[in-house]
């Protein structure tokens, strides 16, 4: 496991993130235009969805698909309660702030998922193609739980109409991920070969550029708002991934997923959203401090998962689910 | 050239609220508005800028509405309902417009 | 032909467009930044132009080049009259609106051309490399005809100075298409090999992303302005491509082009502009409703050509021009 | 600080007409202007936004001119000639400027 | 709706000077501002636009500050110190604002 | 050498630049969105830095590295004095304008460097991987010299605080170049293979697109401000690269670099900054006319180096340093 961690640390992917953080902390003006950052994220979603679908098309679908989707949604629905309880224990945050953070941690970070897939592939660990769909299924339920917590505990929270729900369920990243998953499924191996020049060849390099940008954003966030990250909050940001990963390990093992699948289930549960949920929280819980949840998700938990978490989860999954 | 008095209302609001704001304005009978991008800013909640961001959570937009003076109150009520709990500032200036029949 | 159509339908290219339309109709916020959309279109123009030129360089130039260019320009010049007559027959549109639409249909859609080339290549049907230059030659003449119609029939139309003409003839997409065509021609097979990593390897995948964006824009247009598309207008949007394609078939056959060449001639004649002509019409015929012409070109005719048209035109060309 | 009265004219017009407008302004002796991007809007001809668009047919821009009050009429005549048949709105506000010698 | 008088100061300045300007404003006690992108313009030093540019050397930005009238002079002094030797224009308009407690 | 020049001239890279200039001079509206142009430049910096680092990792580091870095910094520090003297001799520019231009010419143009590396590789001439680091080391010192000249000769110049110096030394392009150089070094050949699909495969094609954009910007600059380029100024723009290249040749030979290394040392010395220094000059010497220095660097010296300079420098290096 230690050698895996070292290898992870020396992967261009991780180093690119580190470079971004360092540049931002040193106050370099290195930055990506907003349009480029968005373009990179559209690319990653399209590619990862497509490859997931194509992999299903060639490996056949698995009886576990439905059960895994359900398990993912359930994890997303329940983890916010755990996160909320932990936050109330460890910190003095308001109900609204704690609930907002809990929503982030119940949901998932697709780029952590992408990085994990890539690092697993680099060690020849394959996973079920439909884990991409599971990722999509885990994005939204956590929001529901967080709003329910707020509704019960405080008078905050804006009451989310059907309109807001449609918006969350049809948010761009979910639609693109699932849409390209379906396209990959329909066109299969042949479709993959047709567009491998885009979705496979430059994939890892583009992931590096994306992580470089994420590093810059994370570093700038830490520099500007690092002070909101009190020790209790940071402790949560390091501990909650382990709690989530344990839940994911249990679920993945019970479902009988492959080692790679279990690892990804752990990664999803351990990761915290930094695109979809932040926007939803601005709409639904405007009183929550965005610097707090974003700083935590992007500045603490994301690097933790990227650098230490993924090798750790793989080791645990290998131990429990058996060698590959 | 003939010009007509009007009010120029400029609402700087979170990007996630853009659609809600414009919807509310339309419902209040505001027939026209223009949305300008905003790249950064600072206020009580600190400094932000859009570089390298991919989500809409941290950006803002500026919405400009030119309206007949008598419609100002309706517009402000509508805008306030949306801005109220959210980050944002509203300013109004006296203006003259061409082609008043359009407003 | 039916199997070709099915294959087309299941190509990632077509499915990406469908995904975009579906996302927009479902009111997802999935969208591409304007800069990325423009960047993708610059890439496609550069790549298709370059490859066309390189193909000429290696296959040698053909006595038919000049005649084909001329025929293209003539088609672009005459088709607007047919389109205008059809519109007056089928719809109650004003002279200005009908003329503006006619300009769009006399001109061409470069992305339809690119998609056709790609789908043909997928079936090992090659075409003359200079068809790219023919596409460029067909962009502008239709505008002339439309303005002539308006000048004769109504008092609208802004009188286009030399200034406006230069602008249309030197519009970015024509210049990039022809420019990269010349570069491809000059640098030949060797130049192509040097930059194949950009203009060949990821080409099809980037086309998918571009069509995804076009689908989103088309779907949003249909949702916002679908009501302007009355049955008569829609009928025109489906019938005019067939009229154009027939003219293209005749021209291509008389010119003695290859099966692929005839198909592309049909595609060009059948397609309707959605970049160059709309901008020109805003300048020259501001009274024309842009939602109408753009909705028709992008929302009706483009998908029709992409999904049904291209396989149909290929079948017709094969029948008339003989197997490959 | 010493400030000088001026007019702030804001012209929101179709992107395709930008060059024609600024050319006309120059011809009318307007020595300075600034162009801001516009990402969306709504008016009598409905709602639009720039996302995913590649052509210039459907976008707009905002052109801001600061001028001495006595030049206002010349500017408006010039602007109107371009805006007239096109989509667009014009508003004028009273302003104060620093460094009047520049205008 | 209740509104309060304020000044709307719009500073159009070289992009390279943005950070210096906002820093100086903060130092002068200006608590809020918003930065808008600018795509092109013209002035005594000629025409420019941002298309295809990659450096920050040739672009400008527009910084909008809404402030209480009594703070105007302090702001203008601060802004002038930065703008003085640089390309840029400053205009001030009278405005009304909602939620004055924020300024 | 003549055949090399002809080959250079017919490379897609050079032709793309020519196309851009032609389009701008013909007043076509062909243009790249700002975000795309920035994205392309970030890509080039990342790729060239990474490949330089990876090359060191596999070829081992060279005792000459430190000496070469030092020599580069010295060249950057001294060349501005030569440039300033030349300008005062050849032109009637003010002290501030001359000093600002001198800063541009003491510093380097990374895209000229990238183009040279690519053209050299096309002729199987390899260079030391650490030349990338030398390029970074040569960016800033020239600014110091220019400010010193102004401080001594006139009362202009804004006095650059520590703050400004940090800004210049940590400017985005230096940080990205050096950062990716280090990543390439750490991850080595294996890292390069992982992301070759991005940093190698499409590299040359992306360079073409970037040069197309640069051509457009250069052409527009020439059209708008060509009048500031008086004969004396133009003479400087053509002569200074030769002076710089000679200094680079001497330094490279004394250092004992390979033919490729000497050529790149010449290219760096001969090239003029058009990203980092212009921004620094706007801050530090706002009275200097940016149209002048940028027009000269981008409109005269860049094309000169690209088309004539690089083959010339290679020939000279071959002559002096001996065939590879
Ligand atoms: N006084 C002001 N003038 C202009 N813009 C402001 C002002 N105050 C706030 N803003 C804008 O509104 C955003 C949120 O403000 P706040 O809610 O005070 O953090 C800031 O980031 C600015 O973009
Ligand atoms: N009252 C208004 N206030 C601000 N912008 C407007 C207004 N009316 C129109 N616009 C802008 O001008 C564009 C065209 O307006 P229209 O010609 O009414 O469709 C709209 O899309 C808006 O961007
Ligand atoms: N009168 C004006 N109105 C609006 N913007 C102006 C005006 N004068 C200058 N500007 C802006 O300030 C920039 C620099 O102006 P200048 O220093 O006069 O070259 C111009 O490119 C415009 O963007
Ligand atoms: Na999670
Ligand atoms: Na056509
Ligand atoms: Na140099």
Image: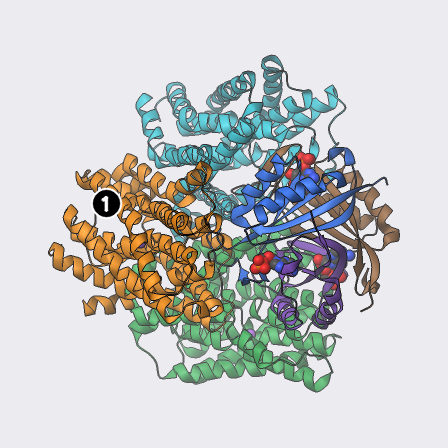
Chain colours: A green, B purple, C orange, D blue, E brown, F cyan
Q: Is residue A235 visible?
A: yes
> For this rendering, which residue is in front, B64 or A15?
B64
Specify the farthest residue to the top: F89
Q: Taking B46 as reference, is F135 above or below it?
A: above
In depth, the one of D44 and A22 nearer the eye is D44
Question: What residue sits right under mark 1 in the picture?
Answer: C71
In the picture, which quadrant includes the C terminus of chain A?
A: bottom left
Q: Measuring from the top left, give residue A285's x and y in whole percent.
A: 67, 74
Q: Residue at x 60, y 12 (%)?
A: F89
| Percent position of residue C21, x then y | 41, 68
User: Which quadrant holds residue C170?
Assistant: top left
Tell me if the residue at label 1 has its CB under 8 Å from ligand 5: no
Q: Does residue A51 appear anywhere in the picture?
A: no
Q: Position of residue E37 (x, y in %)?
A: 63, 49
Q: Secondary structure at mark 1?
A: helix
Which residue is most to the bottom? A152
Residue positioned most to the left: C322
- Residue C20 left/right relative to A220: left
Q: Residues within 10 Å of mark 1 (few under 14, many from 20)?
A: many
Instruction: Give the side of residue A192 with respect to residue F234, left or right.
Output: left
Residue C118 is left or right of residue D11, and the answer is left
| Up-down relation of residue F129 to residue C9 (above or below) | above
Quarter of the rendered structure image containing ligand 5:
bottom left
* Tag count: 1
Image vertical order of residue F50 relative to residue B10, above or below: above
Image position of F66 (left or right of C61): right
Subunit bearing disc 1: C
Q: In terms of image quadrants, where is residue B41?
A: bottom right
Specify the quadrant of the image occupied by residue F295. top right
Q: Position of residue C291 (x, y in %)?
A: 46, 61
- Front one among A303 and F79: F79
């Amino acid at each position: 496991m230690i050698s895996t961690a070292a290898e992870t640390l020396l992967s261009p992917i991780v180093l690119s993130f580190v470079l971004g953080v360092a540049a931002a902390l040193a106050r370099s003006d290195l930055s990506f235009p907003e349009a480029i950052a968005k373009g990179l994220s559209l690319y990653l979603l399209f590619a990862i969805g497509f490859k997931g679908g194509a992999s299903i098309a060639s490996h056949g679908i698995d009886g576990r698909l439905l059960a895994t989707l359900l398990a993912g949604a359930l994890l997303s629905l329940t983890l916010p309660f755990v996160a909320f309880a932990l936050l109330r224990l460890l910190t003095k945050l308001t109900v609204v702030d704690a609930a907002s953070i809990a929503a982030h941690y119940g949901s998932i970070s697709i780029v952590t998922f992408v990085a994990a897939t890539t690092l697993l592939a680099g060690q020849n660990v394959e996973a079920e193609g439909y884990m991409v769909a599971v990722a999509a299924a885990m994005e939204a339920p956590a929001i529901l739980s967080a709003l329910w917590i707020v509704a019960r505990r405080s008078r905050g929270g804006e009451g989310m109409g059907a309109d807001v729900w449609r918006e969350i369920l049809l948010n761009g990243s979910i639609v693109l991920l699932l849409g390209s998953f379906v396209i990959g499924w329909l066109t299969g191996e042949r479709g993959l070969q047709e567009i491998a020049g885009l979705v496979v060849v430059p994939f890892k390099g583009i992931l590096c550029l994306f992580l470089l940008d994420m590093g810059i954003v994370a570093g700038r966030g830490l520099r500007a708002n690092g002070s909101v990250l009190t020790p209790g909050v940071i402790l949560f940001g390091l501990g909650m991934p382990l709690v989530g990963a344990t839940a994911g390990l249990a679920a993945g093992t019970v479902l009988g997923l492959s080692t790679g699948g279990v690892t990804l289930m752990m990664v999803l549960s351990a990761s915290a959203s930094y695109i979809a949920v932040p926007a939803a929280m601005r709409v639904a819980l405007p009183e929550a401090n965005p610097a707090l949840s974003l700083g935590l998700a992007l500045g603490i938990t994301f690097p933790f998962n990227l650098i230490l978490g993924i090798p750790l989860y793989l080791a645990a999954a290998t131990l429990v689910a058996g060698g590959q | 050239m003939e010009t007509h008095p009007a009010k120029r209302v400029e609402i700087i609001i979170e990007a996630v609220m853009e659609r809600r704001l414009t919807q509310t304005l339309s419902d209040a009978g505001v027939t026209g508005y223009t949305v300008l991008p905003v790249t950064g800013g600072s206020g009580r909640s600190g400094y932000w800028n859009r570089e390298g961001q991919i989500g809409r959570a941290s950006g803002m937009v500026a919405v400009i509405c030119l309206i007949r003076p008598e419609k100002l109150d309706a517009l402000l009520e509508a805008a306030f309902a949306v801005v109220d709990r959210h980050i944002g500032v509203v300013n109004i200036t006296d203006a003259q417009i061409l082609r008043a029949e359009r407003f």
